[in-house]
């Protein structure tokens, strides 16, 4: 089907077409030239043999080729064949002698767009055949283009669909693991309380205190889970508000480290802050940045073996790709590091590469949302967050914040 | 002599809560949080019953269960030691039942009192 728009388009273009005419009979060539020249504005290049025609096609670009079948050297069908072999994309019209239907059929089979039987009236219909060829050729081109487009689009859709499926799968996994994560601490709290209610343990004894401590740890764990989930749903809905104000980053870092010291001490890990001499004023929501740093420091504590060191550094930073100076915060640990494969995934939602080592910190296990929350908060401060690590050589988490002017 | 129970669970807090109940019920309770060490501890303690969390760090509990059942401990087949399996996931249930000899199955969150009742049924003094 040829739409009118395509037809118009093709005709418009036909007015400036460059044609190659392969015709050994000068009288016929003259008639062709005249017939086309009268109705179409076009430039016609003329050659007298198939061989010359092929040479021309090799060096020049034509919009249409009209070739006679009966030529002195190779014939029109061979010319057609040569064009196909050279993979030149051009429509061909074959001129055949009277009673040469077989040639006409072969020409069409060989990829010609049209054929015209040489007779008295052929020169009157030739312009129409040429126009029709252009229309059909244009439509074919359009069809190929559209098909390509459709293939591209459906590949894109398929890819998007795959990604959605993957996300959906992660989400279901997440929901099932989160409900599990909720049940365990709840279970511990219930059991602890029952031990005391059933008078199995006396809360005043050492054992009683241990039981209460377990209950407390479990509530801490639940609190972390609930906060993560709330933050995450706010971020998803784009509803997390940032109350930005000029803040001294040194103080934010010190406050964060204060809150993490007791946990670090439990694991005999030293927290070091390379405090810069001058104030580093950033325009941020200090509570949210505190949340980012404590999340990163907390992770570092979880994944660093006893007696390790966690170093926090803040410094001026100039990204060559960005016009303004920024401030970079680095949290470096002496833990076991993250493999290359995993490091690309750690900021993805719901990804949890592994659980922290057993023992007293197990109750601090996260939801797999912590780092995506950090990333989102940093993003909302026009900063970037990334990680560098090598297995066995510790990890470095870094993020940037805009400097306040 | 008190009967011995070994709890193999990487959640130490929870193992503590279980063990308090079991001690209250009159058992001697040991716990092990690392799957890798579990078999050695079984050999060492020779428990009368094992409570095994199927989700352990390092070694997965199911493998451990199979290993204990197949190899036995000190050439003493483990058929004699009842194992109560505790798991957070129900999907593994069939697999657990395929391993002969697990005599109890509890899904987390766990009702510790029911666990104690089951222990009493299996190795209690009334037996």
Image (spheres, helix red, strand yellow):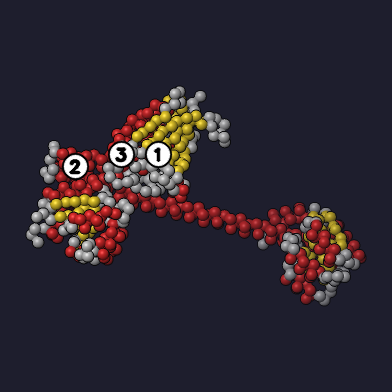
Per the image, label 3 sits on a secondary structure element best described as loop
Q: Is residue B54 visible?
A: yes
Disc with the residue nearer the chain's start (1 vs 2): 2
- The numbered disc on residue A378 is none
- The numbered disc on residue A211 is 2
* Residue holding disc 3: A267
Query: Could you give the CA–CA distance between mark 1 and mark 2, rounded to whole angstroms?
Result: 32 Å
* Residue holding disc 1: A333
Q: Looking at the image, which residue is at 30% across and 45% down?
A: A362
Relative horizontal placement of residue B31, taking residue A16 as reference (left or right)? left
How far from the left and from the top, in percent, is residue A16?
A: 80, 53
In front: A18, or A199?
Answer: A199
Res. A248 image quadrant:
top left
Query: Could you give the CA–CA distance between mark 3 and mark 1, rounded to whole angstroms?
Result: 13 Å
Q: Chain of mark 1?
A: A
Per the image, label 1 sits on a secondary structure element best described as strand
How far from the left and from the top, in percent, is residue A325?
A: 53, 29
In front: B12, or A337?
Answer: A337
Disc with the residue nearer the chain's start (2 vs 3): 2
Per the image, label 2 sits on a secondary structure element best described as helix
Q: Looking at the image, which residue is at 72% across and 71% down?
A: A109
1 vs 2, front mark:
1
Q: Chain of mark 2?
A: A
In front: A235, or A220?
Answer: A220
Res. B86 image quadrant:
bottom left
How far from the left and from the top, in percent, is residue A35?
A: 86, 61
In this view, which residue lies farthest toward the top?
A278
In this view, which residue lies farthest toward the right?
A27
Residue under disc 3 on the same chain as residue under disc 1: yes
Above-or-below relation of A75 to A136: below
Disc with the residue nearer the chain's start (3 vs 1): 3
Q: Looking at the image, which residue is at 81% across and 75% down?
A: A100
């Amino acid at each position: 089907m040829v739409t009118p728009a395509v037809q118009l388009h093709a005709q418009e273009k036909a007015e400036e077409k460059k044609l190659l005419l392969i015709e050994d009979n000068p009288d016929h060539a003259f008639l062709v030239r005249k017939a086309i020249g009268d109705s179409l504005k076009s430039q016609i290049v003329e050659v007298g043999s198939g061989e010359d025609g092929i040479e021309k096609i090799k060096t020049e670009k034509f919009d249409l080729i009209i070739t006679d079948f009966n030529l002195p050297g190779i014939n029109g069908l061979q010319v057609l064949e040569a064009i196909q072999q050279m993979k030149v994309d051009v429509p061909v019209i074959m001129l055949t002698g009277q009673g040469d239907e077989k040639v006409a059929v072969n020409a069409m089979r060989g990829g010609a767009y049209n054929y015209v039987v040489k007779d008295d009236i052929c020169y009157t219909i030739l312009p129409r055949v040429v126009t029709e060829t252009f229309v059909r050729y244009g439509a074919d081109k359009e069809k190929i283009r559209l098909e390509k487009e459709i293939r591209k689009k459906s590949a894109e859709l398929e890819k998007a669909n795959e990604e959605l499926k993957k996300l959906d799968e992660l989400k279901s996994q997440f929901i099932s693991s989160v409900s599990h994560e909720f049940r365990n601490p709840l279970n511990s709290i219930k059991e602890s309380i029952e031990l005391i209610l059933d008078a199995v343990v006396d809360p005043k004894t050492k054992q009683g205190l241990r039981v209460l401590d377990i209950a407390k740890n479990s509530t801490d764990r639940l609190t972390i889970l609930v906060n993560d989930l709330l933050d995450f749903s706010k971020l998803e809905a784009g509803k997390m508000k940032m109350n930005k104000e000029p803040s001294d980053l040194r103080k934010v870092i010190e406050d964060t480290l204060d809150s993490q010291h007791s946990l670090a001490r439990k694991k005999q890990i030293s927290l070091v802050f390379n405090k810069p001499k001058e104030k580093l004023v950033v325009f941020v929501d200090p509570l949210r940045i505190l949340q980012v740093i404590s999340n990163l420091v907390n992770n570092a504590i979880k994944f660093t073996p006893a007696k390790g060191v966690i170093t926090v550094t803040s410094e001026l930073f100039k990204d060559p790709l960005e016009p303004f100076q920024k401030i970079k915060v680095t949290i470096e640990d002496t833990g076991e590091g993250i493999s290359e494969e995993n490091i690309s995934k750690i900021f993805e939602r719901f990804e949890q590469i592994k659980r922290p080592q057993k023992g007293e910190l197990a109750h601090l296990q996260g939801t797999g949302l912590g780092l995506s929350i950090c990333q989102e908060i940093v993003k909302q401060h026009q900063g970037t967050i990334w990680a560098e690590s090598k297995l066995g050589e510790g990890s470095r988490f870094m993020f940037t914040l805009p400097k306040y002017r | 002599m008190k009967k011995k129970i070994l709890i193999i669970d990487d959640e130490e807090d929870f193992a503590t809560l279980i063990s308090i109940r079991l001690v209250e019920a009159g058992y001697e309770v040991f716990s092990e949080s690392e799957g890798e060490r579990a078999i050695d501890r079984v050999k060492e303690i020779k428990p009368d019953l094992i409570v095994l969390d199927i989700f352990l760090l390092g070694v997965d509990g199911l493998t451990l269960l199979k290993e204990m059942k197949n190899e036995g401990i000190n050439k003493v087949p483990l058929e004699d030691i009842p194992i109560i399996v505790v798991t957070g996931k129900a999907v593994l249930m069939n697999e657990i039942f395929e391993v002969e000899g697990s005599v109890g199955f509890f899904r987390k969150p766990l009702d510790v009192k029911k666990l104690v009742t089951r222990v009493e049924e299996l190795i209690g003094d009334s037996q």
